[in-house]
Image (cartoon, rainbow, N blue to C red):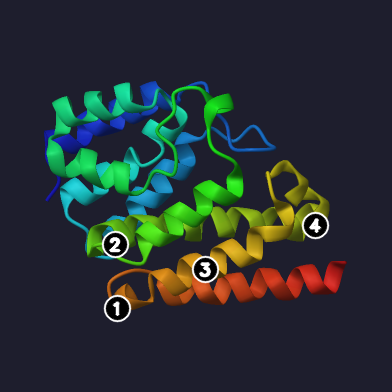
Amino acid sequence: MLTERFSEALVLTERLHRDQTRKGNDIPYVAHLLAVAATVLEWGGDEETAIAALLHDAVEDQGGLETAELIRDRFGDRVADLVLACTDSVSADPDAKAPWAERKAKHLAKLRSADAATALITAADKLHNLTATLRDVEAHGPETLQRFARPDRIVWYFSEVAAALEAHASRAPVAELSAQTGRLERLLAERT
């Protein structure tokens, strides 16, 4: 069962991401974080994994290593380490992040040896991102992908994430991620 720690994480998540929206629209970013945490819980993740799911983008998007230390102080080493394992940049300055391809290559390398909890959070995260992307492409066409840094590499990236997490397919939505990646690839082929 969930405890007061989960409630505290919900409050912190909302506070950290209050002014953030999803790329290219006005959907509050916290909707994504709630969806990822819900998927983690539905796949049997424990409370600390669900807390890390809520906070999985906090370091990357809301303050870098200072935010990682806040998470460590409030929720402990395991939660902070899970968040960092799901993070592809610890820079507090978005302009100081490494180039997209470099960040993604390093992140994929980490995922190939990810533990089960990291794999579950990552698969849930990418599945929700992919679901939102599919919804936007179906409603508004492939041009909606232009909001991303590398629209030409989206299918490749989701495919590589699914492949990197394959060993965890029985404990994370990896098969669903693969299936939805194929669906996006087919949809883009039809519409371009």
Report the disc number at residue 170. Answer: 1
The image position of residue 186, as x and y in percent, is 73, 76
Q: Position of residue 51 (x, y in %)?
A: 24, 42
Residue in the image at 49% along x and 61% along y = 127
SS label for mark 3:
helix
Q: Mark 4 or mark 3, which has the lower sequence index?
A: 4
Please give the residue where the numbered disc 3 appears in the rendered image: 160
User: Do the residues bearing badges 2 and 4 touch, measured as CB atoms within 8 Å?
Assistant: no
What residue type is disc 1 on?
A: Ser
Q: Which mark is residue 184?
A: none
Specify which label sits upstream in the sequence, 1 or 4: 4
- Would residue 162 appear left or right of 143 to someone viewing this image? left
**For the residue labelled by badge 1, is the local secondary structure a helix, a strand or a loop?**
loop
Work out whether residue 30 or residue 81 is closer to the camera in this orientation and state it.
Answer: 81
What residue is shown with label 2? 114
State the CA–CA distance, disc 4 to disc 3: 21 Å
Question: As rendered, which of 86 and 29 lies closer to the eye?
Answer: 86
Of circles 4 and 3, which is in front?
3
Distance between mark 2 and mark 4 Cα atoms: 32 Å
Q: Would you place residue 169 above or below residue 96 in this image?
A: below
Residue 168 rendering spot, x and y as whole percentages: 30, 73
